[in-house]
Image (cartoon, rainbow, N blue to C red):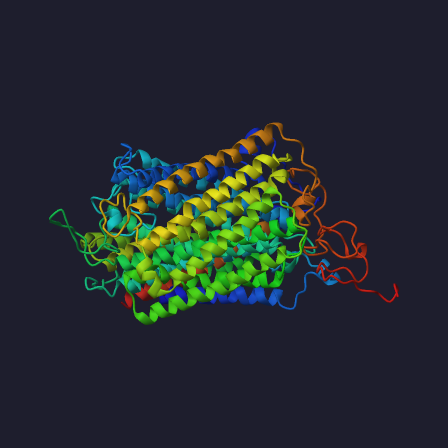
Amino acid sequence: MAFVAFADRDHEQEHHDPQTFLTKYVWSQDHKVIAIQYGGIAILVGLIALGLSILMRLQLGFPNSFAVINPESYYQFVTMHGMIMVVYLLTALFLGGFGNYLIPLMCGSRDMVFPFLNMLSVWFYLLSVIILLASFFVPGGTTGAGWTLYPPQSISAGTPGAGMGIILMLVSLAVFIVAATMGGLNYVTTVLQARCKGMTLMRMPLSIWGIFMATVLALLAFPALLVSAIMMILDTTIKTSFFMPAMISAGEQLSYNDGSPILFQHLFWFFGHPEVYIVALPAFGLVSDVLATHARKNIFGYRMMVWAILAIGGLSFIVWAHHMYVSGMNPYFGFFFATTTLIIAVPTALKVYNWVLTLWQGNIHLRVPMLFAIAFIFTFIHGGLTGIFLGNVVIDLPLSDTYFVVAHFHMVMGVSPVLVVFASLYHWFPLMSGKMFNETLGKWHFWLTFLGAYSVYLPMHYLGFQGVPRRYFSMGTTDFLPESAQMLNASITVAAIILAAAQLLFFINIFMSLWKGKKAEKNCWGATSLEWLTPDQPPKHGNWGHDLPVVHRWAYDYSVPGQEQDYTPQTVPASEVPVGREHGVSTGFSFETDQEK
Amino acid sequence: MTITLIFLAVIMATLIFWLLRQTLNMQPWVSDAEADAVSGKSLKSNAQTIGLTTFLAVATSMFALFASAYTLRMTMPDWSPMNEPVVLWVNTGFLVLASIAYQWTSSVALKKNAKQIRLGLITAGIFSILFLVGQYSAWQQLIDKGMYVNTNPSIAFFYVLTAMHGLHLLGGLYVWGRSVIRVSKDTDIESIRISVDLCTVYWHFLLLVWALLFSLMIST
């Protein structure tokens, strides 16, 4: 018998439901369990990174008041916070978590096409996290080289964790890349080959488009990090000179020759900039679906949204050197990269307009997921606009390495995706758990998070304009900085602590809802996409019971004129929709058929 | 980074062009009976072929990045070209033969002849193992001459590139081993045929990668 991927097996083929506790919940090959495993590990490691950021803020707000924070540990906190948040939390959560959960469900498959590989992916991810966290306990501790791990500093004596710390970081990244590749092969193949009948590419929800394109970027960009990690491990252990230049350390000539640190920067940012979109594109997709569902309106400009995702994906590979303006480059290259950077703002801005226009004249329900989704539009516009500042060489040079940059990337790449994570978790929680969350607690969580984030990052822009440098353990006595800068720093720290504490509300809400929450109605938000149409909630192994679904329309038929209910699920055939009103575009006027006349 | 950029430009342009062709002129908000009948498979190939093709794109990206790093690093003053061991030419011959053997196996697999499939697989495996042994002997020759990983960046690249290529081949040999066991047990020939086809593509890919890497190394 020819091989049939589990994803598109019909009822005539065996599904082999897992029977034991271990195969159901531990060594599970079910995409939903794997998604929750990915999500659980990512959130757990993210909380560690959050804790590290509070320790950093304590030093910045109240310098030298805490004995446990010294210059070495401060740099270690900075490094681990950055790397964990970008790679081990956001990338893993969006692709491994939401990707795993939503792709088969939204595409109408039973599972990923390679379930065993999918299971290996999450275990390799866990292994990478264990290796990373192990670096806290080795002599010298974790690396303190900054999340960019630039040589020669990262492996030179004097930098915290220059021995085992950096090696474990690099090994952990390599293992993570293996995990991401195994997952990525599944996501791409499932989207391309295992959609249910009628699910054309242009009927896919934008969540799937975002996750698909981000996966393509991850598959092509992560090798750059792998290549640089391998070469840097060799520079560290066997003293090759791929990146390490000839240098004197502590009065002693080291054995390195003419290695090129700039080569590392090219490789790193060749991965690093697409990484921004690896995080952003799934967020764009997910937020589009949350906005459309809770505004009861079809997404504005669906095709444009799809093409914008493709354009962003393509352009993201030719902007990397805008991270290297201060490293020095041919002015023509600088011009080229500044231009491509500004061009990529066009499809991105197009998406923002479309989100806003989706809300326009919508029947907006300000539920918790929607609040987070709208907040994302605010923070993303904010972070996007400051990105245009920094994309210009002449503005970037004076602002480089100031708190303006910190504020920019936290708004665009930290706060914005995290708001989408919360929007999505609240949105799909009833489906994942079968329980409803507490709306009041959710709204408290939202307002404290949204206002807290602005209290933390808005003042940082001002500090940046004043010239407060980033990455400094302590400012000391600096003539050009007024005393008020320190006061602002202290207030940011207080806001950050409140913001971090507010996240407890989320966990309390989730755990209380799982324990005592009321049962969620089926398709509680009145959504159109397939994941809400499974026979069971939460969906069981194989997702669809006896038969795979058949799709007859796109995922955005909200408030279709002439329809009794304000949504039409994707599985409803055209024959059940009034003639002449089968499209989902809310035009404000109605069509009359010959018969009606 | 030119090599990588060219590779990526080709990959991304192909993908985006293909996706645009699928999406242009589509009006998903309009009901379409033709679209209702679409199978949900975008390509005619089976899932494993798509999976393998995607993996080959990832591996190509990695080797292209290594090649870019190589060309960038060789412009530094300390670079001195190495004399590649002659045995590499013999090894290349082994890999060519392994590839040919796989191609032959793939053709006899169409006839579902288990004996011939087994013969072809074993021949391909033996040549592949000979290639790896030959690569190891090339390393030994370099070590005997005092040319270690940290002697010169050109030598370091030689070790790294051959190691990465060898690891990919070892991964292929794992799948090859499973195929040999399965064909010996006389199980489902159809599924073995898919495995043989995929391995054939993979071996050809590894031969092409080796040919390009070897050319890069001997020409610089």
Q: Is residue A435 above or below residue A327?
A: above
Q: Is residue A565 above or below residue A502?
A: below
Decide which of B109, B1 is in the foreground and name it: B1
Q: How many numbered circles are shown?
A: 0
Q: Is residue B124 visible?
A: no
Q: In the picture, residue A511 is in which quadrant?
A: top right
In the orientation shown, which residue stands out farthest toward the top?
A516
Q: Is residue A126 visible?
A: yes
Residue B154 in the figure: left or right of residue A360: left
State the image coordinates of residue B210 (x, y, percent, origin top left).
37, 61
In the orientation shown, which residue stands out farthest toward the left?
A251
Q: Is residue A151 above or below residue A519?
A: below
Decide which of B160, B85 is in the foreground and name it: B160
Decide which of A494, B44 is in the foreground and name it: A494
Q: Give the residue displayed 28% in from the left and 35% down from the top.
A: A69
Decide which of A309, A66 is in the foreground and name it: A66
The quadrant of the rendering that contains the C terminus of chain A is bottom right
Q: In the picture, residue A72 is in which quadrant?
A: top left
Residue A212 in the figure: left or right of residue B125: right
State the image coordinates of residue A343 (x, y, percent, origin top left).
46, 67
State the image coordinates of residue B100 (x, y, percent, origin top left).
45, 61
State the image coordinates of residue A526 (x, y, percent, origin top left).
70, 46
Q: Give the residue displayed 19% in from the left and 62% down from the top.
A: B78
